[in-house]
Amino acid sequence: MAVDVLLGLQWGDEGKGKIVDVLAPNYHLVTRFQGGPNAGHTLEFDGIKHVLHQIPSGVFRSDIVNVIGNGVVLNPIVFKKEIEALLSLKVDISENLKISNRTQLILPTHCLLDACYEEAKGENKIGSTLKGIGPTYQDKIGRMGLRVGDILSPELEAKYHKIVKRHSQILDYYQFEYQLEESNKLFFEAVEFLKSFDIVDTAYLINQALLDGRKILAEGAQGSLLDVDFGSYPFVTSSNTMVAGVCSGLGVPPSQLGEVYGIFKAYCTRVGSGPFPTELFDEIGERLRAVGHEFGATTGRPRRCGWLDLPALKYAIMINGVTQLFMMKADVLNEFDEIQICTHYKLPDGRVTEQFPFHIDEDQITPIYHNLKGWKQSLEGLAQFEELPRELLTYVDYLQQELGVPINVVSTGPDREQTILRDQILA
């Protein structure tokens, strides 16, 4: 068996949580390999909306093992709240959640540093979620962080306070006001809670599962265009959100990777600062936001909205080696007379390109659009691909031809049941 990978191909918020929940019954393990509580994976079923931040989206399937891998950064305080929220819904995952002992811990001072650095940037803010992600990865790379395995050490408090002292010196340098007494208390309470879960070397766990013939799904967080190396730098996250991050974030060799499922919305959105060539500032952009309920699952911030961007999407498909595409939120476009698709960029020197440039500045790029007729009807109650409106099938066929990868899922609503799958998925 191989590790199949599910990734967002835009700037995040593509609907990964819903699709993991739909696909999960086909797998024995669902794993997270990067990111932290800056991710918000939304699932909806039985009339209840669930938002997960650090826990894999397979938790609502009781027979599936969920793994938080070493590439994740984990906030114990957020983790405790998230588990308690699940318990209130009678979802107990204490037996089927495994946490890597190599996972880095987010300390309260990491969150303070995040806010401090963002404040210091002034007009150059990148739109951080202020969850402490960047400073935690900085400490990881600087070899100065705490890992989940360290909470089992009798020297935990000494290590913790040594790091907090160093962080406090930075905060004091920037004259950033803060209080630590309450957050320190909450941190150690959450650490005691975390100790009750299985803390293991998940690289051995996952590789043994592969040897045993078990099927594994790796669930990406954020989106490929937020990758720290290949995204719209510096307006990116602090981890590798693309398929290569699976190997380093779980401890599996590239030879064990299987299908790569790429998720994208039928249009585009982005939260926070950064370039967005197809962003709409008019009534159409407002309609996309309103109909699509486009507000950040983690921050609540309104998402910026625009038409689908094929140069960016082709780029994400290329760097990830995507084998199947899943198109989300097709229903948001139900009432549009005309749908536009950006096929190329016109650069300041007049050149036309379909490549995603090193410097992508929406003030310097003019999108070139191809127009298609809208379907102007509800998708409610449709269950088969062939039942979709002719204009929507034309939209799907056009995208498949342009992208060179089959679109095997069309999502027609937020509920897990509002998902139309082609027969060849998971073939």
Image (cartoon, helix red, strand yellow):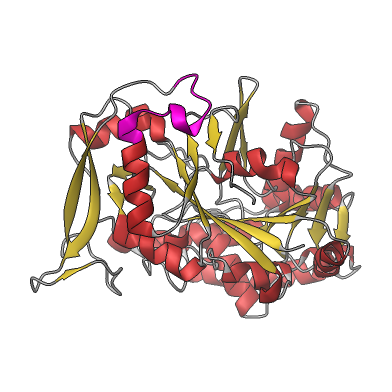
Identify the residue at horizontal 82%, vertical 57% (top origin): 214
Residue 62: image quadrant is top right
Q: Is residue 389 above or below residue 100?
A: above
- In the rendered view of the protein, which quadrant contains the N terminus? bottom right
Residue 45 seen anywhere in this rendered image of the structure: yes
Identify the residue at horizontal 53%, vertical 26% (top origin): 383
Identify the residue at horizontal 50%, vertical 19% (top origin): 381
* Rendering coords of residue 274 (x, y %): 32, 59
* Rendering coords of residue 349 (x, y %): 9, 74
Q: Of residues 217 and 372, which is closer to you in this image?
A: 372
Q: Is residue 19 above or below residue 173?
A: above
* Rendering coords of residue 175 (x, y %): 46, 64
Marks counted in the figure total 0
Residue 273 seen anywhere in this rendered image of the structure: no
Residue 40: image quadrant is top right
Q: Is residue 308 above or below residue 254?
A: above
Q: Is residue 132 left or right of residue 352?
A: right
* Rendering coords of residue 55 (x, y %): 70, 47
Q: Of residues 256 and 244, which is closer to you in this image?
A: 256
Identify the residue at horizontal 89%, vertical 44% (top origin): 95
Q: Of residues 135 and 322, which is closer to you in this image?
A: 322
Q: Which residues are magenta?
A: 380-392
